[in-house]
Every structure is written in structure tokens, then in C-alpha cells.
Amino acid sequence: MGRVDNKVALVTGGAKGIGRASALMLAREGARVVLTDVEEAQGSAVAKEIERAGGKALFLTQDVTDESRWVEVVEKARAQFGGLNIVVNNAGIGTAGSAEDETLEAWRRLMSVNLDGVFLGTKHAIRAMKNGPGTGSIINISSIEGIVADPKLASYNASKGGVRIFSKSAALHCAQAGYRIRVNTIHPGYIWTPMVEGYLTSLGDVEGGRQVISKMHPIGRMGEPDDIAYGVLYLGSDESSFMTGSELVIDGGYTA
Ligand code: NAD
């Protein structure tokens, strides 16, 4: 028996990294999975991987900043699998910039994906789940950068801090409205994904950067995507049914 049997999950940014690992794990544990991404080829490949392993998956292209696409995606999930129980708002981007140097254009682009995307995903998840079958769990991926600041990551800090407190507001709204919907955040430390690899490549020293970042985590290593997917699985399952408005920090001791 799987830990999320009979549930339907939607994972944004499911083509790579943390989203891919979360989609695969939720499917392995019994969920039917809708995964979405702007990257069509890689997203379709993940859906095929799930199907080959005997799971059920649907890939849809989606830019999480587009509200009309959210309406279509939720409707397609309902038509294919009958409703939504777990929504993982994972799609995100990371760009470096200080409070003094960041351009308004870069700031707005990052806010649009990391904050508007989570807002829209939460809003449409609530609308789909409140009258849908079973219970709902919305999992918004924040970051250690939503808890502690980095002088080079001004907009990223602001977006991830925004995800953290927005999710608490949404959790209280759902609880007070009497919906059977929980909203929580996950705060990963540095996780070895294409996002981090791209960042270290831009600095010109992937292996050196990897060692420096590993040492920033008291546990002595960076995280792997599955380290976060296990958190997604817990928050998506009924094992966490008393948890809402909470933060799951999975960071190898980084913020301790
Ligand atoms: P990644 O770049 O490896 O994967 C992100 C995925 O999101 C990609 O497949 C990308 O195509 C997709 N995406 C980007 N913009 C999108 C958009 N507008 N609409 C739909 N999809 C879009 O990143 P990752 O490291 O797996 O990060 C996933 C999430 O975890 C992000 O929110 C990130 O901020 C957060 N996070 C990552 C780390 C880390 O160290 N990797 C740490 C803390 C938090």
C-alpha cells in the first residue's frame, strides 16, 4: 500500500530537480500525478518514466505566471483524474543581485515566477480542492533563503520570504473557512539540481563551489532532490493531517 494511494497530485516545475524527484516519489507511493513545466521535452520524459514504472501521469506545458493557463490545467487534471488532492508549487528561478544593483526588470521577472506563480497555484488549488473529493494539501516550496538573508540574493530572499508568510495566510484562510485543505512550506538548503549546477557554472568553478557550499551545511554535504521529495511525500500524505501553516526546514542544519 502506498502512502498517497487514491490521491491526485499536481507538481509544477516537474521536469527537473526537486519537482521531478517529487513527481516520481508521489507516483511511486500511489498518487496519480499531473506534472507541468515550461520545458516540454523534459517534462514529457518524466511522465513517461512514471508510466513505464507502472504509475499514472499526465504532463502539461504550463507557465505558472499565466492565470488563464492555471484554469485550464486544473480543469484538465479534473477531467483526467477526477480532482486534486496535492498541489506542489515548486516551479521557481534563481538570479543573483544585491539590493543596490538588481535591475527592476530582473526583480519583477523573479517575483513573477517565484511569488505570483505560488499565489496563482495556491488560489486555483483552493478553488479546485474545496468542493473536490477528499482532503487537500498545498505544498509551497520556499527556501532557507526565505528564512535567512544573503546580500547577493535580494529578490530571491524577498520572493521566498513572501512564499513563507503568504502560505501561512492561505493556511489560516482555509482553516477558518472550514475547508479540509492544509497549506505548508518546505525550506530546502542547497540541493544538487540543474538550478544550482547552473549557478556554479556561471561562477566558473563547479567542483570548488560544490565543496564550499557543502561546508556551509553542518551535516557536511549538499542535499539531493529526494531529500526534499520525502518532505513533499510526508506533507502530501495524511500522516501530516494536523500540520498546517507550518514550515518544514530540510537543510542539513544550515539555519540551525
Ligand atoms: P531547477 O531549475 O532544477 O528546476 C525548476 C523547474 O522549474 C525547471 O524544470 C524549470 O523549467 C521550471 N520552471 C521555471 N520557470 C517556470 C515557469 N515560469 N513555469 C513553469 N515552470 C517553470 O530548480 P530546483 O533546484 O529543482 O528548484 C525547485 C524549487 O526549489 C524552486 O522554487 C527553487 O527556488 C527551490 N529551491 C531550490 C534549492 C536548491 O538548492 N536547488 C534550494 C531552495 C529552494
Image (cartoon, rainbow, N blue to C red):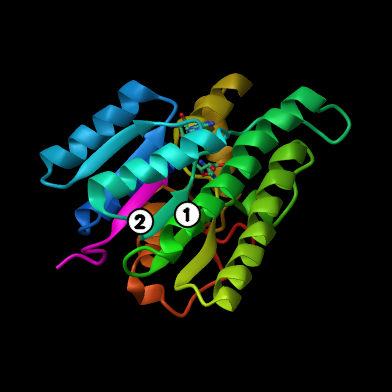
The residue depicted at 56 percent of the width and 27 percent of the height is: 200
**98 sits left or right of 202 in the view:** right
Q: Residues within 10 Å of mark 1 (few under 14, many from 20)?
A: many
| Mark identifier at residue 104 | none
Q: Residues within 10 Å of mark 2 (few under 14, many from 20)?
A: many
Of all residues shown, which one is farthest toward the right? Answer: 100
Where on the picture, by quarter, is residue 65? top right
Q: What residue does disc 1 label?
A: 125
Find numbered disc 1 in the image and state the secondary structure of the residue it sits on: helix
Residue 188 in the image: x percent, y percent? 53, 53
Where on the picture, by quarter, is residue 108? top right
**52 sits left or right of 187 in the view:** left
| Mark identifier at residue 84 | 2
Q: Does residue 230 show up?
A: yes
* Circles 2 and 1 in contact, beta carbons < 8 Å: yes
Q: Amino acid at mark 1?
A: Ala
**17 sits left or right of 168 in the view:** left
The residue depicted at 42 percent of the width and 32 percent of the height is: 37
Boundaries of the magenta span: 1-11
Q: Amino acid at mark 2?
A: Leu
Q: Main secondary structure of the magenta part?
A: loop
Where's the N terminus, which quadrant?
Answer: bottom left
194 falls in the magenta region: no
Q: Does residue 204 show up?
A: no
Residue 173 in the image: x percent, y percent? 62, 69
Residue 164 in the image: x percent, y percent? 64, 58
Where's the C terminus, which quadrant?
Answer: bottom right
Give the tally of numbered discs.
Answer: 2
